[in-house]
Image (cartoon, grey):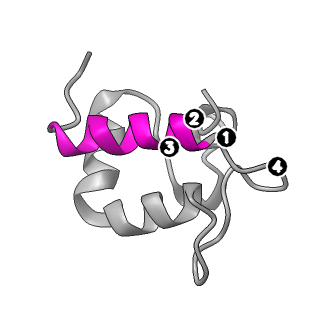
Amino acid sequence: DNCYICHQQAVNLGNITLEGHAALTDYLDNNQDRFIGAIKHDDNYAPMPQSAAKLADCAIEKIEAWIDQGALNN
C-alpha cells in the first residue's frame, strides 16, 4: 500500500514499478537489499516511503517474512 502510491506503473517514480506480483518479484530478484534497506531507512539507502515516516517495525517484519518465504502471490 505504501509503495504503490509512487511506484505504480502510471507514476513509476525513480523508474521503479512495483505494480503487480510479477513486477514486484522481478524487482526483488535484483534489488532485495536495496528494497529492505529503503523501507528500514538504513544508511546508504533512500528512505521509503519518501518524505514520510518509516513503516512500523511489525509491517517491515511481515514484508521480510513474506520475502523469506518466497514472496508468494498471496
- Label 4 is placed on what type of residue? Ala
- Label 1 is placed on what type of residue? Val
Extreme residue toward the top, this view: 74
Among numbered discs 3 and 4, the one appearing first in the sequence: 4
Q: Residues within 10 Å of mark 2 (few under 14, many from 20)?
A: some
- Tell whether label 2 touches label 3 (CB within 8 Å): no
State the extent of the magenta-drawn residues as a range.
57-69
Check disc 1 and report the residue beneath it: 11
- The quadrant in which the N terminus is found is top right
- The local secondary structure at tag 4 comes to loop
Q: Nearer the viewer, residue 58 or 53?
A: 58
Check disc 4 and report the residue beneath it: 52
State the mark number for residue 8: 2
- Tell whether label 2 touches label 1 (CB within 8 Å): yes
User: From what the image shows, is residue 44 above or below residue 34?
Assistant: below
> Residue at (67%, 64%) from the top-left corner?
47
Q: Using the numbered discs, state the Cα–Cα distance from disc 3 to disc 4 in whole angstroms.
A: 15 Å
Among numbered discs 1 and 3, the one appearing first in the sequence: 1
> Residue at (60%, 47%) from the top-left corner?
12
Among numbered discs 4 and 1, the one appearing first in the sequence: 1
- Label 2 is placed on what type of residue? Gln
Q: Using the numbered discs, state the Cα–Cα distance from disc 1 to disc 3 in whole angstroms.
A: 23 Å
